[in-house]
Amino acid sequence: MPTIRRDTPADHPALHAIWRRSVEATHHFLTMPEIDALAPFVEQLLGSGALIVWVLVSGEGEHIGWMGMDGAKLEALFLDPDLRRQGHGRRLVEHATRLHGTVMLDVNEQNPDAVRFYEAMGFTVTGRSPLDGQGKPFPLLHMWRKG
């Protein structure tokens, strides 16, 4: 049975690899150079302590996915793309809800699978921004779910 635990520095290479594979599999609106440009930011984010990072690991200790929280805001959720649609994302979101009750997030509008996932999890769109957090023209949907 998978478990959720806090990250350690030893987890970060595996979490970064999951981020990379996940983004390549789901963020079709990004070019490879754009993904490459984001990679150092993700490495820095994982090591900075700016987010509380929760890791989902299998019973055998294999990394399945992770999420990063800033208070009640879900800033990141990435799963090994080979392990999607098995309830792992739901498990992470439910963990965030148990911790914080109401959970907020921003999701790329151009990632329809993620939008559908969050809607199925009970999140509601509360707004939209035409630019992402880096000022790029990748619209974000602002969503929240009351626990």
Image (cartoon, rainbow, N blue to C red):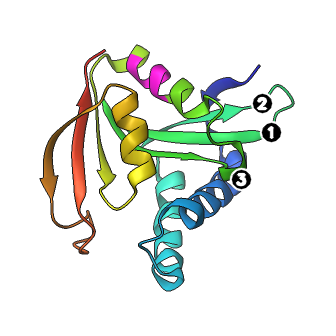
Q: Classify mark 3: helix, strand or loop.
A: helix
The Cα atoms of the two marked residues, 3 and 2, are separated by 13 Å
Give percent across and percent down for residue 110. 34, 62
Q: Earlier in the sequence, mark 1 or mark 3?
A: 3
Q: Which residue is mark 3?
A: 14
Nearest to the observer: residue 110 or residue 68: 110
Compared across the picture, whether 37 is left or right of 106 comes to: right
Q: Label 2 amino acid?
A: Ser
Q: Which residue is mark 2?
A: 58
Magenta stretch, main secondary structure class: helix
The answer to the question of whether label 2 and label 1 lie on touching residues, with beta carbons closer than 8 A, is yes
The answer to the question of whether label 1 and label 3 lie on touching residues, with beta carbons closer than 8 A, is no
What's drawn in magenta, residue-wise? 93-97
Q: Which residue is mark 1?
A: 62
Q: Nearer the viewer, mark 3 or mark 2?
A: 2
37 up-or-down from 146: above or below: below
Give percent across and percent down for residue 76. 44, 47
Nearest to the observer: residue 42 or residue 116: 116
Does residue 71 appear in this view? no
Residue at point 70%, 40% (across, down):
64
122 up-or-down from 107: above or below: above
Q: Label 1 amino acid?
A: Glu
Q: Classify mark 1: helix, strand or loop.
A: loop
